Image: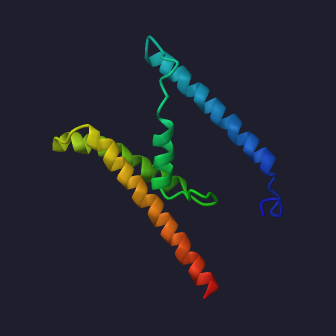
């Protein structure tokens, strides 16, 4: 479909990787300026958090649709879970459990909406 609209997918994908690489380099540079010592494994384990924030923000797991504002809302929601639980005096282990529950709800809601969309087309 993108090709029919005049968009060249390989160019767009390549450009996205170049921009993300440049932003990663900028983040590393700013981190090096801020801290005396930069750990090589500083971002390990954050992959699942990033995917979770995007999914909670409304981006479809199967791909094809999503928005930047939804992703920012997902980041804000998951970022406030930890401080809120700390404020309430809950144990730290509940943070991951609550984040997991939020992710399950978001994925289930996306699945249910997709099923309803398919039912509406066949009726």
Q: Identify which residue, 97 or 34, lies in the foreground.
A: 97
Q: Is residue 13 left or right of residue 34?
A: right
* Residue 80, quarter of the rendered image: top left
Does 16 sit above or below residue 1? above
Q: Residue at x 63, y 84 (%)?
A: 122
Task: Assign the C terminus to one quadrant of the image.
Answer: bottom right
Residue 74 on image: x %, y %: 43, 51
Q: Residue at x 63, y 36 (%)?
A: 20
Q: Residue at x 49, y 51 (%)?
A: 71
Q: Is residue 80 visible?
A: no
Q: Is residue 6 left or right of residue 115?
A: right
Does 120 sit above or below residue 92? below
Residue 97 on image: x %, y %: 32, 46
Residue 26 on image: x %, y %: 58, 26
Q: Identify which residue, 16 or 113, lies in the foreground.
A: 113
Q: Is residue 58 visible?
A: yes
Task: Assign the N terminus to one quadrant of the image.
Answer: bottom right
Instruction: Please identify the residue farthest to the top as the structure is shown.
Output: 36
Residue 113 on image: x %, y %: 51, 71
* Residue 65, quarter of the rendered image: bottom right
The type of colouring in the image is: rainbow
* Residue 82, quarter of the rendered image: top left
């Amino acid at each position: 479909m993108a090709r029919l609209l005049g968009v060249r997918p390989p160019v767009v994908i390549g450009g996205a990787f170049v921009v993300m690489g440049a932003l990663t380099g900028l983040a590393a540079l700013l981190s090096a300026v801020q801290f005396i010592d930069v750990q090589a494994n500083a971002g390990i384990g954050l992959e699942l958090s990033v995917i979770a924030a995007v999914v909670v923000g409304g981006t479809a797991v199967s791909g094809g649709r999503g928005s930047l504002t939804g992703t920012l809302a997902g980041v804000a929601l998951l970022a406030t879970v930890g401080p809120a639980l700390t404020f309430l005096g809950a144990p730290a282990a509940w943070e991951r459990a609550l984040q997991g529950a939020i992710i399950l709800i978001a994925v289930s809601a996306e699945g249910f909406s997709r099923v309803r969309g398919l039912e509406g087309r066949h009726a």
